[in-house]
Amino acid sequence: MSVPIERDVATLRQKVAAWRREGLTIGVVPTMGALHEGHLSLVRSALDRADRVIVTLFVNPKQFNSAADLAAYPRTENEDAAKLAPLGAHLLFCPDGDAMYPPGFATTVSVTGVSEGLCGAHRPGHFDGVSTVVTKLLLQTGADFAFFGEKDFQQLQVVRRLVADLNIPVEIVGCPTVREEDGLALSSRNLRLSAEERAVAPALAGILSRTADRIENGASVGEALAEARDAMASAGFREVEYLELRGEDGLKPMMTLDRPARLLVAAWLGETRLIDNVRVAPKR
Ligand code: PAF
């Protein structure tokens, strides 16, 4: 069994139109490939929800800040297709660079507000790149549902915002972060960790979860965040890029837990940047 691969937008649209004529619903799972269990869980959610599931694979140059990072990004189309086949995904859409950004391409989708701060502050242009490509993928596939992981929580909020603002007729479905048994959030970047770094990495999730508990139990947000930063440094993280409590809806900074929130972190372990987040909610 294999997954049909499509590269051409016009042919993709014909296939989608044929499914629509049969009255079928369509789900899309946008990815940049190098698929791991986190992506596969999105595909399973999509298969539960929609009659036909398109997985997209496009390493989007517009969302990388550094040419070296883009060049180093794993490209594993054959392995990715092999992972998708047993799940029953219906189509793998792998446009090439020119199909996505033909000569003369001059449009940027830029979301303000939720894209500011956090990853937006440390990766200039990143969310413009994400917003532009996600808008295109949603319009190209015409999907009814699109599935994104909560691990990239800020990205999920940016996508929700652009879909609402541009009246794109798709339901955005956020799916829980998938973790290793030791708590480390799955990410293609985990493969870059040395054995020693891999042993340290789960401390990030542990510290986040303990800090969330403390805040939920009434600790001062400022003190809990400062102690969490110290704990990350002691565990071996060389830099904490950000560690913040933000409102779950709208991502506004919070210093008092008066509504549901997310505790979000980006930290460097050697040369690898890890991100993670957990929910923090006031006790009733
Ligand atoms: O999360 C990702 O893998 C990418 O940012 C996405 C949504 C596929 C857009 O390129």
Image (spheres, rainbow, N blue to C red):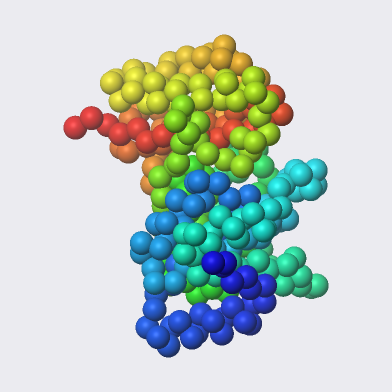
Drawn side of residue 244 relative to residue 9, left or right: left
**Quadrant in which the N terminus is drawn:** bottom right
Residue 76, position as x, y percentages in the image: 68, 53
Describe residue 45's horizontal placement relative to residue 90 as left or right.
Answer: left
Give the residue displayed 57% in from the left and 21% down from the top. Answer: 199
Give the residue furthest to the front: 1
Along the viewing direction, whichever of 277 and 34 lies nearer the viewer: 34
Q: Can residue 215 be seen in this view?
A: no
Q: Does 142 sit above or below residue 81?
A: below
Residue 256 visible from this viewpoint: yes
* Residue closest to the far bottom: 21
Q: Give above or below for 277 relative to 162.
A: above
Check the picture and name the quadrant holding the C terminus.
top left
Q: Is residue 235 above or below residue 64?
A: above
Can you give x and y, in whole percent of width and height, for residue 272 in the image?
67, 31
Marker count (numbered): 0
**Residue extending furthest toward the top:** 234
Q: Residue at x 32, y 38 (%)?
A: 260
Give the residue at x 64% y 77%: 9
Of residue 54 and residue 100, the one placed in the foreground of this image is: 54
Q: Nearer the viewer, residue 284 or 170?
A: 170
Q: In which image quadrant can residue 133 be found?
A: bottom right
Vertical comparison of 193 with 126: above or below: above
Residue 160, given in percent of the width and then of the height, sits at 45, 57
Residue drawn where x is 42% and y is 61% of the image: 46
Residue 247, horizontal then vertical, whole percent: 39, 39
Q: In which quarter of the image is residue 224?
A: top left
